[in-house]
Amino acid sequence: MNDFRESGLDQNNNHAPVNGQSQQLYRNRVRELRENRLMTQSQLARRARVALRTVHSVEKGLKCRMDTKRKILLALGCSFDERHSVFPE
């Protein structure tokens, strides 16, 4: 798969534009914390009461709503005050 358009990524490994808009990626520590707690993405999604697709997108670095961040933080056993160490922006 040498064509970047097939992978959905551009040459810099950013998401290719969708309908003329590019999606910026944001680094976060959700995957690291989830794996440290020996949780699967499905387990985190159930515990946070969000869709599995949401957990996958957040771990890839896509932006999410503050309410989603709060749900994920609490599901990981973190307090909302720790959000900046998990979701630095």
Image (tube, helix red, strand yellow):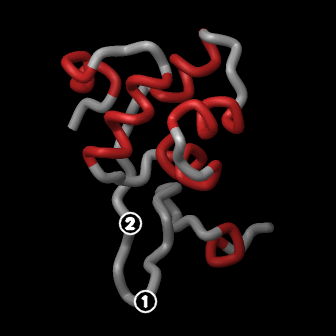
Q: Is residue 77 shown above or below 61?
A: above
- Is the residue marked by circle 2 packed among few (<14), some (14-19), or many (20+) residues within 10 Å? some
Which residue is rendered at x = 71% and y = 38% of the image? 42
Which residue is rendered at x = 52% and y = 63% of the image? 11
Which residue is rendered at x = 46% and y = 81% of the image? 18
Which residue is rendered at x = 67% and y = 35% of the image? 41
Q: Report whether 22 appears left or right of 59.
A: left
Figure quadrant of residue 81: top left
User: Percent from the top left, x then y, of residue 73?
Assistant: 39, 26
User: Percent from the top left, x then y, of residue 30?
Assistant: 48, 28
Gap in Å between the C-alphas at discs 2 and 1? 11 Å
Residue that mark 1 sits on: 19
User: Percent from the top left, x then y, of residue 36?
Assistant: 60, 10
Q: Is residue 32 shown above or below 47?
A: above
Which element type, helix, strand or loop, lies under badge 2?
loop
Q: Report whether 76 appears left or right of 45.
A: left
Residue 23: which disc? Answer: 2
Nearest the viewer among 62 and 48 is: 48
Q: Is residue 43 shown above or below 3?
A: above
- Where's the C terminus, which quadrant? top left
Nearest the viewer among 44 and 17 is: 44
Q: Report whether 77 appears left or right of 49.
A: left
